[in-house]
Image (tube, grey):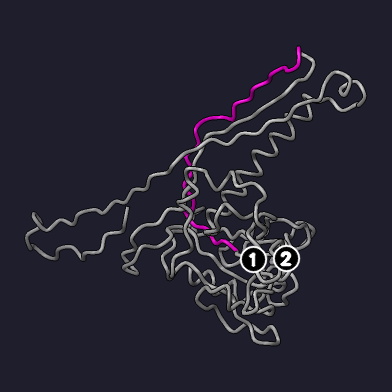
Amino acid sequence: MADLVDDGIVGDNEREGNEEEMMTYTDTISIDLISHGVRQKGKLAEQKTVVKFREHARDRLAYWLANRMDQLAFLTLSGIGYGFNNDGSARTSGAFSTLAFASDVSAPTTNRHYRVTNDASSVYTGLAAGATASVDATDTLSYQSIVDIVTLAKTNYVKPLMAGGKEYYVAFVRPEGLAQLKKDQDFQRAVVTGLERGKMNPFFSGGTVTVDGLVLHEHRLVYNTKGAASGSKWGSGSTVDGSRMLVCGSQALGMADLGSPEWAEKWFNYNSSPGINVDKMFGLLKPKYHSIYSGTVEDFGVMAIDHAI
């Protein structure tokens, strides 16, 4: 539901007939089903190993499901098609590209896509409009860039998360990106001196760091180009490795979650070969609505920040 834009009525002027219509926007999330299974070769194979097939099969399938759902969520937020892995390489299987919600993946909108710019000496020069072909190898993250990113999120009216009466955004960043920040002296001073000293300080404990209302969350599945072939990366020569940090506020991602995963076990070959399968029905969508502030349709709750790694 959009904010109200009219200024209302003053004094004893007529109120009736001058009400403002509240504008609401809706999205439709398409759903689909993903599944995977494993199968033991037979009784003899089970006897030859100490590995318990059923126990390990369920563990591996549970991890597979959680991991693939995370992959798709990050790709959706990043505006990257499901034909790619999260490291920029092409998927060997085209199954995910045929999901019912795959065609709903969209690139970041104009006022939600930026890139870090530094000079040749890696000195921060500001944020620029997102353009992967313009990313240079020196365009790394810094404390100054974090300050500008939070400012942009606020001035572009990305709806924040609220906790304790304060506004917060959550930034998902690759380990390389967080390492860049930890090496930055301004960032070190902000975290080491700005927070409680001691072994529980997140700079020393490796915990989640909150800087200027931005919760920095490290995640390996944040989109990057380290797996892409030279010529398919970023930069003017398509040789620069980069990553897309995601700055998320409220309602950054829509998910239709249709119940718990379903497990099925079956025996094959005259009950000598067990198999286990898991499936999950869900859908993903990055919400986009008309912004009363920019006058255009924008990604509602997420900003994409490209930088070199």
**Which structural element holds mark 1?**
strand
Indicate yes or no whether the magenta region holds residue 247.
yes
- Up the image or down, 63 lies above or below 163; here it is above
Could you tell me residue 106's position as x and y percent?
A: 47, 58
Q: Which mark is residue 243?
A: 1
Q: Residue placed farthest to the front in the image?
A: 269
Q: Nearer the viewer, residue 105 or 6?
A: 105
Q: Residues within 10 Å of mark 2 (few under 14, many from 20)?
A: some
Depicted 262 relative to depicted 82: above or below: above
The secondary element bearing badge 2 is classed as: helix
At label 2, which amino acid type do we have?
Glu
Earlier along the polypeptide chain: callout 2 or callout 1? Answer: 2
- State the residue at coordinates (56%, 74%): 115
Q: Quadrant of the C terminus?
A: bottom right
Residue kind at label 1, given as amino acid type: Ser
Q: Say whether marks 2 and 1 touch (CB < 8 Å).
A: yes
How many marks do you count on the picture? 2
Residue 32 in picture, x, y percent from top left: 50, 37
Residue located at (72% from left, 65% from top): 176
Q: Which mark is residue 176?
A: 2
Please indicate, yes or no, whether residue 294 appears anywhere in the rendered image. Answer: yes
Q: Is residue 306 left or right of residue 28?
A: right
Question: Is residue 251 at all visible to an observer of this figure?
Answer: no
Q: CA distance from mark 2 to mark 1?
A: 9 Å
Front disc: 2 or 1: 1
Q: Quadrant of residue 88?
A: bottom right
Closer to the camera in the image, 250 or 238: 238
* Image point (86%, 22%), residue name: 46
Which stretch is magenta?
245-270
The residue at 64%/29% (across/down) is 278
